[in-house]
Image (cartoon, rainbow, N blue to C red):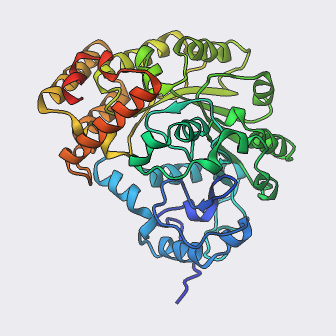
Amino acid sequence: MENQNQQRKPFCTAPFFHYYYKGDKVNTKMLPCCESRVEGETPQSFEEYWNSNFLKEVRQHMLDGKKHDICTRCIDVENKGSFSARKHYKNMVERLEKLTGNELEYNVQTGTQYGTPLAMDYRGSNLCNLKCRMCHPGSSSEIAKEMHKFPEEYEPFNLGNPKHKLYKDNKQPNAFIETLPLDNIRRMKILGGEPLMQEDVYIALEKVKNLPHAKDVIISFTTNATNFPERFTNLIGQFNKFLIRVSLDGVGNVYEYVRSNGNWKKVLENCTKIGTHGFTDDEICLGFSFVIQFYNIFSIKEILTFCAEWENKQEEIWNMNPFFSIIEQDHLSTMLLTDEDRDFVNSQIDEFDKQYPNKEYTQTVRNIVNKFDTNRKTDKKTALQLMKEYTLMQDKVRKTDLASLHERYAKYL
């Protein structure tokens, strides 16, 4: 029997106030958050999703204090001692309640007393100018284009048909943004592809900018920072706070290997430029994110050192700790490391810790290397073989060489 009683602390708050959208010309995905691991029937509109039996079922589980099958990812991360998205949404609720001046009242039918989302994660297109090693055609039109150009090379890896994800098919803005209810939005997270290339992102920002409470809205952007157009920087001061998270995944030549088409020098210039644009730290926060993976693991000391040195040089805009996450693909994880190489990586972290003690993010990196990435679904032998085949294929297609990054890679290939 449905329980309509409000509960101040549901198992997870995301299904009540948050909305995740990822779409392209063929597929539309709507879920409580990006970590959801189970989907209901594919809805055709926001209203159909927000009022669906699937979402009501999820909300009921949350109000009853029970996890749902969608919660697999968060529970796994929490069991390994890390900070999960579930905890992130709990903290987000506290900030939203301060912004609105009202406590959220949870219910199964409409989510909260507002009836529409207060926070949104919007990913309207795969249009992108990079083809990162750990990415896929659903989030990169450049990878789709490469797959289309080299079908025989990519065919064994079963990444799907890239035809509808090609660059030329994504030049028009995603019209879905025009149908989304943004009137109650207080926080909007925007990712891609590369969102600064996508017209529908600017449509969304213009719509939110014109809301009566626009100055109370926090915008969270994840970008590759290959370009900060004037059109974008002109919008930043229109909101309460702009949180800009730049995806790097490496430094120097490792960055350019992992994030194919990227230019390390240009990205650093852009990040420095955004900090000298006249914004105050009340208007903008800048931070970096790194997906810890096999391709960057031997340069972990350089990555950590870069973060520490950047923090010292750019205090006026550096307000967020670097974010280190676990790669999803088993065959690109640090599970592949030999014991000797894992010891080497740990020694590099130790050296950094001596030079820059008490950095909060150091322990997160240690956990990924020693705990999170040692318990994978794929057995190590299978993962190693897939890594070798996939890496050699992409190196051939892109005319690159993983072994040139560090001498320790040679034995894996």
In the figure, 177 relative to 192: above or below? below
The residue sitting at the bottom extreme is: 1
Residue 109 percent coordinates (x, y): 65, 77
Q: Residue at x 59, y 38 (%)?
A: 145
Nearer the observer, 65 or 336: 336
Would residue 166 be found to the left or right of residue 137 on screen?
A: right
Q: Residue at x 26, y 50 (%)?
A: 376
Would residue 60 be found to the left or right of residue 337 on screen?
A: right
Would residue 282 be found to the left or right of residue 375 on screen?
A: right
Number of marks drawn:
0
Residue 42 percent coordinates (x, y): 61, 69
Corner quadrant of residue 351: top left
Considering the image in quadrants, where does the C terminus appear?
Answer: top left
The residue sitting at the left extreme is: 340
Viewer can see residue 36: yes
In the figure, 125 relative to 281: above or below? below
Corner quadrant of residue 143: top right
Residue 4 percent coordinates (x, y): 59, 81
Nearer the observer, 150 or 8: 150
Residue 141 percent coordinates (x, y): 61, 39
In the figure, 235 relative to 67: above or below? above
Viewer can see residue 357: no
Q: Residue at x 58, y 17 (%)?
A: 267
